[in-house]
Image: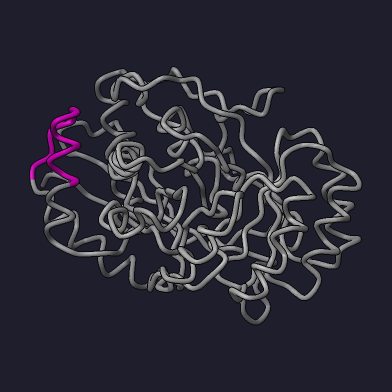
Amino acid sequence: MGLTLRHEVLHLALRDPFVIARSEGKAGRTVTTVIVELRDDRYPQVVGLGEGFPDAFYGETPETMATVMPLLIEAIGEFEPSVAGLAAAGERMAARIAHHGAAKCAIDVALHDLTGRVTGESIHRLMALSSTIPPTDFTIGLDEPAVVGERARQAAGFPALKIKVGGAHDLETLRAVRDVYDGPIRIDANTGWRPDDALALLPELQGLGIELIEQPFPARRLDQLRFLQERSPIPIVADESAVTADDLDALIGVVAGVNVKLAKCGGIGPARRMLTRAKELGFRTFLGCMEETSLGIAASAVVGSLADWVDLDGCLLLAEDPFEGLELGSDRRWRVAEAPGLGIERRPS
């Protein structure tokens, strides 16, 4: 029989409305994520948990994931729960189907969790990675400036804030945040700016002490990203333009940094390779997330030691998290589990 996969689609409420520049319709109240349970018939009592967050921007939905995941399991074939086996499984999935990062991510994370549980090793030890990672920032979505300012005040205990921009009142919003928060401010336009407007904002952004500007322009407009970076003392970070490691070479000389997300690139293994390659090419590295549960955030935290900046707050945005086992320290650093696998379990119903 080999590997068998079961998946579940979760619709989760958000603690506060969370809108970004490319949100549509009534987006911002709930999120949809996909949880998988992976079993190997050789270890009938062991279940590997995984999560993949489908983002329609990248062409994925729960329905595409449900179609693609069985094909990926078929491509893996016989699986050996080891570091070499994880690498081989990732290569087989990549060879079978291009793109579909969330579907690959769900399976890759579950394979890692399964391997850790079978071998009795935590994932970071299995992969010889440090458990010490940078503290996470906290993200605040688009809203009226006063509302964003109040949410920034409430989140002032975080060592950095990430503010979504690309709306009608960006400068007023950032001033409202700076009025109540004196730490680093990172901004993310999610492709919502135009070059002339961004250039005009630069002096104001410098004055406000903005630490980085994430994806100001459309994903394919590398010429616009280069235009702004050449004129900006503030690092420009590619997100929608940096989906997998294959995108990195084209970004050399275009931006200063890249945002790596497991749900984009395909899981723990691909994220590790992308972060390592990005550093080799001279990029600053930003480890980001979707609005995932703590299962997805725990998987991301495994590779957190490879990042310069960390934005792993997805589960903190949820009204209720269906998983437990991940701990956020008072220093806002995620405590990477020492338990076998990811150390994450379902909360009792």
Residue 226: percent from left, percent from top: 45, 63
Left or right of 345? Residue 283 is left
Q: Magenta stretch mostly in which secondary structure? A: helix
Residue 109 visible = no
Rendered residue at 45%/41% (across/down) = 285
Q: Position of residue 194 (x, y in %)?
A: 60, 76
Which of 255 and 181 lies nearest the eye of the viewer? 255
348 up-or-down from 141: above or below: above
Quarter occupied by the C terminus: top right
The reply to whether the magenta stretch includes residue 86 is yes
Q: Position of residue 151 (x, y in %)?
A: 84, 51
Question: For this rendering, which residue is in front, 56 or 82?
Answer: 56
Visual colour scheme: one colour
Q: Residue at x 25, y 56 (%)?
A: 246
* Residue 88 falls in image quadrant: top left
Between residues 268 and 49, which one lies in front from this camera angle?
268
Residue furthest to the front: 231
Is 215 one of the magenta-colored residues?
no
Residue under the point 13% across and 31% down: 84
Horizontal arrangement in the rendering, residue 299 relative to residue 236 (left or right): left
- Please state the horizontal and vertical placement of residue 29, each as a whole percent of the image: 70, 66
Write the residue at 29% across / 34% down: 114
Magenta residue span: 78-90
Q: Is residue 97 visible?
A: yes
